[in-house]
Amino acid sequence: MHLHRYEKIWLLFGVSMLVVFLIVLGVGAFAQGAQPPGQQHSGHGAQRETVNPETVESTAPFNQLGLKKIGENEYDAYMLAFAFGYGPEKMEIPLGATVHFHITSKDVVHGFEIPGTNVNMMVVPGEITQMTYKFTKAGELLVLCNEYCGIAHEMMQTRIIVK
Ligand code: CUA
């Protein structure tokens, strides 16, 4: 096949652009894949770390569930979700306390929602979901699971008492 000089130039140009495009795509995909795992899907200020769901109950800090004081009316709350409930069974939080929740699941995906607040987390086995909330109203708060997790999903709940 005989090609004119200009046709050759255009063909070469077209092929070069395709190669450049593929390289850009490849580099982009690599850059995304190379993100540290803890930084992925962290929306709404939530951060995630990992933990082995099979041994989580004997792994610090999840071997001692509940509130841990870390400052002036500031606490870490370590919690575990499971089919069908939460540990610890009941939690008392001092009024006005800032609480940093660290919660994980030992079996399937659960939810952790406190109706009437902006606390709404997805609890995934193997990941520690974290969120901070300041409890400024006294009273009893319901914690609900909002991810379908099995036969007793509707019954899965716990209570937080703020006083
Ligand atoms: Cu746990 Cu639904």
Image: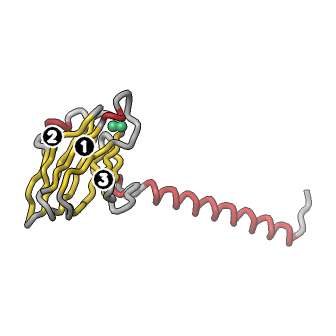
Residue 21 in percent (x, y) is at 64, 63
Q: Which mark is residue 51?
A: 1
Q: Which mark is residue 83?
A: none
- Above or below 131: residue 150: above
Report the residue at 10% width, 64% height from top: 73
Question: In the rendered view, would you say 101 is above or below 137?
Answer: above
State the SS at label 3: strand
Residue 55 sits in quarter: top left
Q: Nearer the viewer, residue 136 or 45?
A: 136
Q: Are marks 1 and 2 in contact (CB under 8 Å)?
A: yes
Q: Residue at x 35, y 56 (%)?
A: 36
Placement of the N terminus among the 4 image quadrants: bottom right
Residue 86: quadrant of the picture? top left
**Ligand 1 lies under 8 Å from the Cβ of mark 3:** no
- The numbered mark at residue 48 is 3
- How many residues crowd around disc 1 within 10 Å: few (fewer than 14), some, or many (20 or more)? some
Tell me which amino acid carries mark 2.
Thr
Q: Position of residue 89 (x, y in %)?
A: 17, 39
Q: Which residue is mark 2?
A: 59
Q: Gap in Å between the C-alphas at discs 3 and 1?
A: 10 Å
